[in-house]
Amino acid sequence: MTNADVTRTIDAVWRIEAPRLIAGLARFCNGDVGRAEELAQDALVSALETWPREGVPRNPGAWLMATAKNRQIDLARRARVFQLKTEELGRELSVAAPVPDPEAIEDDLLSLVFTTCHPVLTQDSQVALTLRMLGGLKTEEIARAFLVSESTIGQRISRAKRTLADAEVPFEVPPPDERAERVAAVLGAVYLIFNEGYSATAGKNWMRLDLCEDALRLGRMLQQLMPNDPEVHGLAALMELHSSRMHSRTAPDGSAILLLDQDRHSWDWLMIDRGLAAIERAKAAPGRAGSYTLQAEIAACHATARKPEDTDWFRVAALYRDLSKLTGSPIVEINRAVAVGMSSGPEAGLRVLDAIADDPALANYHLLPSVRGDLLEKAGRGAEAAEHFDLAASMTKNEREREALARRREALRTNS
């Protein structure tokens, strides 16, 4: 194996093992996730130095864990503060024959998930810390994904770890009375990561596939950790179904292809099956299915329609109505307007938009004029549609989306 092969292997191992490694070390360090991450990084550096020379060990995760724990023991021994503890831990450890406890690892992972998404942190910090500790992403990778500087992400992560330490956040799964709210924060952070990848808010690319893949991996992990939570399965289903058409959403030149124009033969049917199965698990789990499950059911309506004209738009509109009642979100109403426009005609869709036109939350939201332009075009009101595409293009920060809106505007003006 060449050094380049070993480096690629280490990178892959890190992506897979980093969450378990940091979670296990956090428990080892009495819940100090910052210290746990430092030890994990030290172990990674040791792997980069050792594996090219001695080969990749048979159990890389156990090797990293043992190396990190031995590093902590060395530090403690040097400080001569934790001598007794060091001797005790030293007897327990063995690099050659580690005996990981799967249940303990699962518990530690779940504790890490709730720690990185603790409410004392801002959502930006939750996302950065989750990607770092559970996604195994490096600082520069997170910075590149969110189009901010490396120093910004580095400071954000440092502040987050300091905040957790100052607040003395316990490294544990929250008690039952806090569980629902805390799970919502965890799912919110993961879905934010996915959405930023699926519809990039800024930059040159329509999507960032690596972010979607990271979020989907986190979602599948949460399914294993919280199998009785319906919304965990609902979110996983939603991401599976959206991801199934990921590679159909852009043309070779990077421009966007809208849902009804996509080649459905290229959709990933394995992912669709996984998404549909996750919906069934969400419905079978105790408790009431929430917004993620409803969104997944909407995505399923599209995913199971073999041709665009087979889409059950009345059901899609009804699901959006239920989702709107549940969330009160004006953005959901914009999506409902699209579905109503498809099922009952563009003028009916425009009436849905009229009802939310003055909502302050939508003052700078480019999809409001974009959808209005689309419905106006379908209603044969080309000149008005062009004005709204123009307005939407001036509001979006995504270059590909701006180009697509400009093309629709120019097509209308050319044909008028």
Image: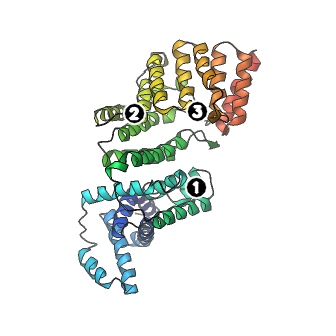
**In which quadrant is the C terminus drawn?**
top right
Q: Is residue 258 visible?
A: no
Query: x, y (%) of residue 62?
Result: 31, 65
Q: Nearer the viewer, residue 183 or 263?
A: 183
Q: Nearer the viewer, residue 7 or 370?
A: 370
Q: At 54% from the left edge and 56% from the top edge, which residue is drawn?
A: 141
Q: Nearer the viewer, residue 261 or 229?
A: 229
Number of marks: 3
Alpha-carbon span between mark 3 and mark 1: 26 Å
Q: Is residue 34 left or right of residue 205?
A: left
Q: Amino acid at mark 2?
A: Thr
- Residue under circle 2? 293
Q: Which type of secondary structure does the marked residue at label 1 adopt? A: helix
Which image quadrant is residue 89 in? Answer: bottom left
Q: Which type of secondary structure does the marked residue at label 2 adopt? A: helix
Residue 143 disc label: 1
**In which quadrant is the N terminus drawn?**
bottom left
Query: x, y (%) of residue 177?
Result: 34, 49
Q: Earlier in the sequence, mark 3 or mark 1?
A: 1
Query: x, y (%) of residue 76?
Result: 37, 81
Which residue reaches farthest front? 177
Q: At 70% from the left edge and 36% from the top edge, which residue is drawn?
A: 395
Q: Amino acid at mark 3?
A: Ala
Q: Is residue 81 above or below residue 379?
A: below
Alpha-carbon span between mark 3 and mark 2: 30 Å
Q: Which type of secondary structure does the marked residue at label 3 adopt? A: loop
Query: x, y (%) of residue 292?
Result: 42, 35
Q: At 40% from the left edge and 60% from the top edge, which residue is drawn?
A: 18
The crowd level at tag 3 (other Cα within 10 Å; few <14, some 14-19, many 20+) is few
Alpha-carbon span between mark 1 and mark 2: 31 Å
Residue 251 disc label: 3
